[in-house]
Amino acid sequence: MPNAVISCTGTVGLCKCSYIVNYYINTIHVIKPVLPKLNSLFEHAVSVEGGRWLFHPSWHMCVYKRMFESENKTLTKEGILHFLELYETRHLPNSLGFSEFVIGPLMDALSESSLYSRTPGQLMGACPPLGMRLQKFLATYMMLLPEEEKGSFLLKFIQKMTSRHWCAVPILFLSMALAYIPECKILGTEGLHALRDVLQCTMITHQILLRGAAQCCLLQAAMHLTDVEKVSLPEVSSFLLSLRPEESLRRDTMLWMELCSWLQVNERCFRKSVTSDSEHQDTPSLCQYVCSLVGEYLKTPMYERENCFMPDWFEAKLVSTMILLAADVDGKSNIEWIELEAFLNPLLDVLMKLGSNAYIPTLKTDKSLQLLLKLLQTCSLKCSNTQDDGVLCFIWKSLMTPVESILEFVLRRLTTNELSTVADLDRCDLYLALIPEIVNLCLQVSWKKVPYIKSFILSLTNASIRNLQERNCKEPKLQEQIKKVVSMASLTAVCELMDREPEAHLDSLPSVDALKGFISFSQFNDVLKKPSYIGEESRYVCAIASVKTTSQGWGKIVARYVCDQWICLRFVLSSFPTLAQEHEETSGMSLYTVERSRKILQSALEALTILPSDQVLPVFDCMKVLVPKLLDCLEPLCIEAFDLAWKIVSSLSNTQLIFWSNLKAFVQFVFDTEVLAVAASAKGQAYAKIKEVIFKLIDMSTTKTGVFNVVISHCCRSWIFPTVDERSALTNAFVNAGNYCELITEACVFGTVFRKDQRLIQDVHAFIENLGEKCAANLVTESTHRDDHYVRVCAIKFLCLLDRSNTLHKTLMEDIFIKLLDKDEQVSRSRTRYYANSLQHRIKNRVWQTLLILLPKLDENFLCGILGKVFQAGFGNNQASVKYFIEWIVIMSLHRYPQFLNKFWDCFCYDEEKLKTSICTFLSVLSHFDIILQNTSEKKPALKKALIVVLQWCFNHNFSVRLYALIALKKIWGMCRMLHLEEFEALTPVIESSLQQVENMHGTGNARRNWQRIQDHFFFATFHPLKDYSLETIFYILPRLSELAEDEWISLSKFDRFTDIPLPPAFQWYHSRTELRDLKPSDWSQQDMGSSSAETDSQTEWTDVQKKIIPWKNSTPSLDLEMVFQDRAAKLGKSNSRLIVVASLIDKPTNLGGLCRTSEIFGASALVVGSLHYVQDKQFQHLSVSAEQWLPLVEVKPSQLVDYLQQKKTEGYTIIGVEQTAKSFDLTEYRFPEKSLLLLGNEHEGIPANLIHHLDVCVEIPQQGIIRSLNVHVSGALLIWEYTRQQVIKQKQ
């Protein structure tokens, strides 16, 4: 019987929950209080006897499914978090329905990226709540599932991750949840294939770090969850090949070592492959598999000798990866490298025969060279000390043996007619890619092979030049054209090799002069005519088929040929002397005359129009050399080069793969030291064009994070650490910093307010980076420095390196200081009131942070002229963080130069109207008067003046001002007592009694509490302007303590991590004191600050602000608001109503205009709105029909509503909310008190949860229809009329 009662009660409860969820599906504050009831209902649902369910769990699933499908993402997130927490530690229903619910509706909901955001209290870099709960839920659920169901559930879970286009963030956290599952052997071949499919899903996102981290997690999940007896080594190796070595699986990572350990433990346990050989049973299965893998890979039938197409690279990657894995596994217990030698011997046998045996099948040579290249490239990915890597050293020494044979084979193939088809161009790429790897191998292992390499380069260069100089007939054949393409590509490889390996001294070869001469007199942008195939059918059947089937048409081949020409020209241009010496050269070197330079630049512009965007980099590099020589005489042509280059770069902004390399080349071209210097010296159109490009790049970087990073990094490094360049006639590269100081100025204040999706990606990046070495992606992925903080960090470190004794440095710092002050003034003029954490607030905050960095480097004369502007900024309506920086700068300026105190005293001489929002700033400065007077011998006059100034403000009518004045008085009076100044004995009784009174004040208000809070505030209690002067305080601690948005906090680790601009070893302003670092934000509310954001909750620790300074009384500071209403009503002959209608949450002008009209008609005493700006709106005026002129309107922002409602409660008002709740009264039954305050909710969200508990009562309008929702103006009008009706009846009675 009791169970039946519980079942009945639970069913009724679930029905109520389901009803609430269905009807209030988008109203979070109504549904959220219901969620805890599901806990108790769920507990009652499970019978203690045998774990039986008293009612079917689908009831619960129905409730959660509705929340998961809600359009309100906040509600969806709450529902998911509650679901994961509810089932995390309790009994789970033993039903397939529940598992299907997890794989179905739950995973569908988890695909939304925005759900993985941090909670407001979490630090950046922490794991989001959904990620943590998902890990715990999945691990717990897997443990509670019966053994026979675990495998099928997990397989369906993983397959669900492959069934749709998941975004990077959900895939990452689902993969982490899989990796978090405790080790259990439940996945077989199908599960491993599903994980591989998920890996391929992670490739669609452009966030490389997120992609790499997901791969790491999926590999860990595979190792934890795979039943090795159900999978074979070929299946495992195929799975491993889906992992990218440049993003996750690299040899020097913990993940690689973990994989090696897993393979070593399980190597005899894998299922035997169907195709495996049964011989050599004593050999460990992994080594046996790799040996057979290498053998099968190199085994080719003889009849495939003349195969047209290159084999796929998949096999070569697979074999090279498994060789290294098996070698590392074997190397843990065997230092003889017997097995590794067995792996390599088949390959070495083929390579040794390449130079002497011309009859080796083409397929075999292709495969052997592909494997060789992959082995060399994979080995070179290891970043640790190669001397300690036994496997790497053994492989390198082994591969040194066939070097001569390989080079002989490559030379023959590249210089004779053996490469004659379009498909052979892939082989050409393979051979040319091997050359630098082999040269690097010889330089690393043995220099004895270097002479042979030089001989190879000499022969390759001369033969390629001869081939290119041969004249073709009018109708060229395919073989002839392919030979030219191969020859030009070979010369390109030689040029790049000489640039990349200068220690080999290849540029001293006699063939280099021949190469330079050939390139110098070649025709640029020379294209290859499409060959004729007439009469060649029998010989070139394969060639014709390849042209028809290959993805690269003849146009791509021509583009490659042209690009190779420019790569060779880049090498030639970079190897010639400076322009001054060029004029002294013989007439034979006509390439380097101005006319020749002009023709080359025109050819470069033509090349930009015909080359694909991914092949323009060498053209940019050539333009970088040519433009400085021509800017003086051919400025229009150079400007055309700037415009065309910018057009190409800007058109690629949505093309992730090639955009960044092109942007880098463009920046190196336009912002080349010599280009900037020549343009600045002429101050012509080119100078203006470069500045235009600067602001275009900055504008692009607001939507594409990382663009400005490339520019500022290049410029700062080239200006402060210029490289030795023999071509440059510039004596001091730093001059450019002064000519283009706008770049530094904009960098100092750079940063945008990110959209939620952008902020989410940044948060997840920070979370992954915080994992450190635990996540291999942090070590493997290339650091792109696309963090938005990088720009400011780079600029600040640049400024820190400047030396005030250097005239150029000093001039630049002063110029930047003035420009930043102008920027602050410009922002202040654009918007006199700005919200906390708005873009205006952030820019002003960055301005003053930079000014504080520059301050110690400024001399007295400059500071004397500029200090007036600093004081003027203090008069503005500033947010708290900006206020602190201004005060700090003033304190430090007066500390260094006390003679400026007279200018400071003048700030107190303005009328009260100007000082009403700024006097607290200047009083705060006086609270650190002991710091200011440290360098002053005559302290008495200054203390006397300070006392006179402060005492005047101790009696101000504004309570906040009095508090600041008393703080300053306490500090100054303490200094007077320490100095035993007899001159002030007459003031002693007054000052002592005032300070004693404030210390011992009593009363009903908040005065004493506020006095204690302001004394405990960090700026007055702990902060020391001199000892705490550091990068950490300026960019991290002070923004944190002043409650600036977290994405404005720049941690000290970023100054260390971004090493492009290193700080000097003697730099001492790194860390702040521990006392300040350990503080938490104070609850003292700044009073002289900008407006708080209308969207920000003001649920701080104390909201009962002193009544004398509440914002909505500023218009009538000396009169009670209610008396003003009564007086105005009497003058207008209106009824004396006590109804206040609060519409601060309403944001549509039409609704506000209608409410204004209704309130005025029925005699409400006041209408409270979120902003008085609504009154100017035409829609408001159209509906209000001038009612605003006859009805008192009061401005109370949504963030101030808590304080306002508390104030009205103390005045005897009943706070009534128009909202449907469990305890709301029916409007027809409720009796309104005379002093009623009617709070109306927002059009969409209703009354926020933080205001619900401030209401005295909720009233709802009885409804009969289905929609169950009235317009807020109509709802307000009904309640206003009902209040009026009841008051009229009372008056008649």
Image (cartoon, rainbow, N blue to C red):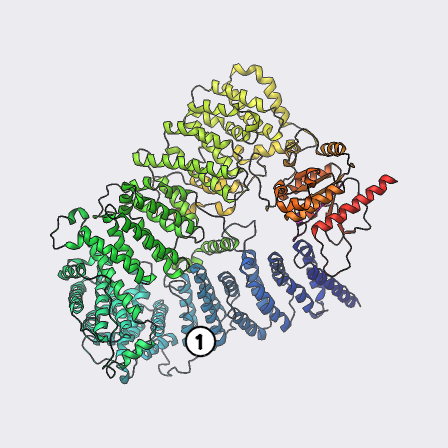
In the rendered image, which quarter contains the N terminus? bottom right
User: Tag 1: Cα neighbours inside 10 Å, few (<14), some, or many (≥20)?
Assistant: some
* Up/down of 980 relative to 722, above or below: above
Q: Position of residue 617 (x, y in %)?
A: 30, 58
228 or 930: nearer the viewer: 930
Q: In the structure shown, which secondary structural element does the residue marked by tag 1 occupy?
A: loop
Confirm whether residue 803 shows in the render: no
Q: Residue at x 39, y 76 (%)?
A: 285
Q: Position of residue 521 (x, y in %)?
A: 17, 60
Q: Position of residue 797 (x, y in %)?
A: 37, 43
In the shown orientation, is residue 1209 left or right of residue 893?
right
592 or 845: nearer the viewer: 592
In the shown orientation, is residue 771 left or right of residue 389?
right
All told, the count of numbered labels is: 1
Amino acid under label 1?
Cys
> Residue 563 is drawn in which quadrant?
bottom left
1199 or 388: nearer the viewer: 1199
In the rendered image, which quarter contains the C terminus? top right
Residue interval drawn in magenta: 1232-1250
In the shown orientation, is residue 309 left or right of residue 257?
left
Q: Residue at x 53, y 33 (%)?
A: 1021
> In the rendered image, which residue does mark 1 sit on?
269
Q: Position of residue 1039 (x, y in %)?
A: 50, 41
State yes or no: residue 1205 in magenta. no
* Up/down of 251 relative to 891, above or below: below
* Up/down of 1109 relative to 340, above or below: above
Confirm whether residue 316 shows in the render: yes
1002 or 559: nearer the viewer: 559
Q: Name the dominant secondary structure of the magenta segment.
A: loop
> Residue 1284 is drawn in which quadrant?
top right
